Structure formats: C-alpha cells, structure tokens
Amino acid sequence: MGEMTIQWLGHSCFLMTTDKGTRILCDPCDAATGYEIAPQECDILTISHDHHDHNYAALALGNPVRIDKSGEYRAGDVRISGISTYHDHDGGKKRGNNIVFVFEFDGMRIAHMGDIGEVPDEATMARMGRIDVMLIPVGGVYTIDGEEAETIVEAIKPKVVIPMHYKTPALKFELNELGECIKLIKDRPVHYMRSSTAHLSADTLGSDRVIVLDCSKE
C-alpha cells in the first residue's frame, strides 16, 4: 500500500495527499478565525457546512471538484461518502446540518467529522463503516466535546484519532483546550508531533492511538 500525507492547516482545515498525488482540501477557514492559511492547490474540496470557519473556498486553488452535499462520489483515486448529521443536539434546529465525509484511498478509510454536534445514532455510524483514521472535533461549545468524541471513538474504533477544532493560541474565539479532553487521551498512546504533517500508510497505522498535529509548524 502507498503512503499518504495529512497536514493540519488549522481549525478543521486539512490537506490530504494520496500516494498518487491527489490533493484533498477539507473545511477551509477564513482569517476571521485567527488562522492565516495560505491558498492551497487541490483537486478535491469538501465543505461540511456553510459557516465561515469551514467554507472559505477562496483557499482552494486550481479547479477542484467541490463536494458540499451528502452522497457518493468518485474523483480520481479517491472514493468519497458524504453522510448527513447535525451540527447540534436538536436535529439541526440551532446550527443546521453537518456532513461527515469518509474518504477511501491507499487502502485506508479516513473520516472528517466536520462540525458534528451530536453523537450519531447507530444507523449513521453503520453507514460510516470501518474507519482507519478519524479527524474529530473535541473543543465543544459549537460541536461535540472531548467526552462525546470519546463516545464516538469507542463505538467506531478507528485505528488513529486526530483531534481538531479546539482552542489554540491562534484561534480568536473560545473553545475547550485539548488538555480538557482527558477522557479521549488518557488510555491511549498519544503522539505529539512537532509538525503539522503526518505520513500514514495502511501497513503502519497501528491501533487505538492519538496523533496531535501542530498547525503552527511546517
């Protein structure tokens, strides 16, 4: 199996690159968040919901395939499933809908949970299927918090968890800090990277571990 890279650009924005070079930009955010993210060349752009800290499409250079609705998609060597969820605990009445995107490439299945605001029901988790790498919000306030993230992780059992959407020095609004997500990390090996980028392959994922990326580093 090939090796992919996943780079945390800040907040919920990631740039994933497959072994064949296909670039996927997820949930780009604008500068009002506090993150100054440079525009990125990409082939696929996914947007989980239409809020300014997740839908800043101006960061996507080139002519990417834009996916902002639920459904099944194929772009190059990447299969994508968009699964409808909610941005709150009240059926979307407070903050609207959210799309969980599941990407399949290089022998791995990667879930970007967007701004999910609830623990999804069993049917929704069954639609997600096997997940190898999960990018999940943990900062609470506008999304699930660390305890709810732990509930989802325990149910789906991804091999690797990468936290996102939490308070950092750059962020201009209040969320919980990563250190408050004690339950998520207390019983798992945690790898604190001195880099914004992780290199992952199906053969070397390991199991039940957390990778913390540093978006302030190249």
Image (cartoon, grey):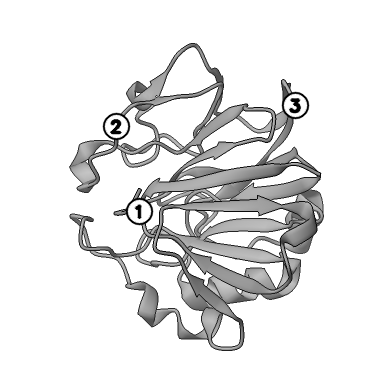
Q: Is residue 181 left or right of residue 110?
A: left
Labels 3 & 2 near each other (Cβ < 8 A) = no
Label 3, on which residue?
77
**Could you tell me which secondary element the residue under label 2 belongs to?**
loop
Labels 3 & 1 near each other (Cβ < 8 A) = no
Q: Is residue 216 left or right of residue 69?
A: left
Q: Position of residue 67 (x, y in %)?
A: 58, 25
Look at the picture and state if 83 lies above or below 66. Answer: below
Marking on residue 50: none
The tag earlier along the polypeptide, 1 or 2, is 2
Marking on residue 38: 2
Label 1, on which residue?
215
Q: Residues within 10 Å of mark 1 (few under 14, many from 20)?
A: many
Say what amino acid the circle numbered 2 marks. Answer: Ala
**Could you tell me which secondary element the residue under label 3 belongs to?**
loop
Front-most of residues 98 and 109: 109
Say what amino acid the circle numbered 1 marks. Answer: Cys
